[in-house]
Image (spheres, rainbow, N blue to C red):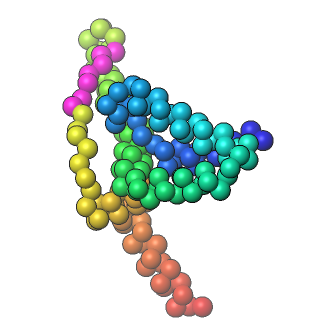
Amino acid sequence: MIENEVALRKRIGRIYNKRQSEFESLLEYNDYLEEVEDIVFNISEGIDVATTESRIAKYKKENEENIAFNQANKAEMARQWQGKSNVGGVRLQEDAAKQGAGTVMEEEAVQPIKPLSKMELKAALIYAGGYSEESTRRRAISECYDTLFL
């Protein structure tokens, strides 16, 4: 039961993945979060599932570019956090400990969101899925050669 709701929240979270900074006011963001919770509740309780699923599909189709951008941004933030201890534009610097001042927080400039071209969108989707163009190319070549020897 709980596993089903967790899986549902993950699925909905991949589609409805806007952040508070993308809204003009806190009220709009809270309305967005309430809509997401209504969707999760309706599906998990079996209330008007067909209408809710069509609402999700419509939202996904209308916001495909933003969804891909936010997924790529989330993947990039995770890679930065793992590699450089960089989370949400704030970097923890270890050299401050050498000076005896503890840990210093340094804010980085936030880049404005720009619309993506079709090629950039394709690269963002590949990158968000955890693949690089090189790994995709290697897999295609490997599959090609594997079929020759069947």
104 relative to 12, above or below: above
Residue 83 visible from this viewpoint: no
89 horizontally vs 51: left or right: left
144 horizontally vs 122: left or right: right
The spot of residue 9 in percent (x, y) is: 61, 42
State the image quarter where residue 140 is shown: bottom left
Q: Which residue lies furthest to the right in this view?
A: 1
40 horizontally vs 92: left or right: right
The spot of residue 59 in percent (x, y) is: 47, 52
User: Residue at 47% of width from left, 84% of height from top?
Assistant: 144
The spot of residue 89 in percent (x, y) is: 31, 30
Q: Which quarter of the rendered picture does the N terminus lie within?
A: top right
Q: Is residue 106 rendered magenta in the image?
A: yes
133 relative to 16, above or below: below
Q: Residue furthest top?
A: 100
Please state which of residues 64 and 42 is positioned toward the viewer in this rendering: 42
108 horizontally vs 147: left or right: left
Q: Is residue 130 rendered magenta in the image?
A: no
State the image quarter where residue 127 is shown: bottom left
User: Residue at 34% of width from left, 15% of height from top?
Assistant: 103
User: Residue at 67% of width from left, 46% of height from top?
Assistant: 43
Which range is magenta? 103-109
The spot of residue 108 in percent (x, y) is: 24, 29
Please state which of residues 49 and 94 is positioned toward the viewer in this rendering: 49
Q: Which quarter of the rendered picture does the C terminus lie within?
A: bottom right
Please state which of residues 86 and 74 is positioned toward the viewer in this rendering: 74
Residue 11 visible from this viewpoint: yes
User: Residue at 36% of width from left, 55% of height from top?
Assistant: 65
69 relative to 22, above or below: below
Mark count: 0
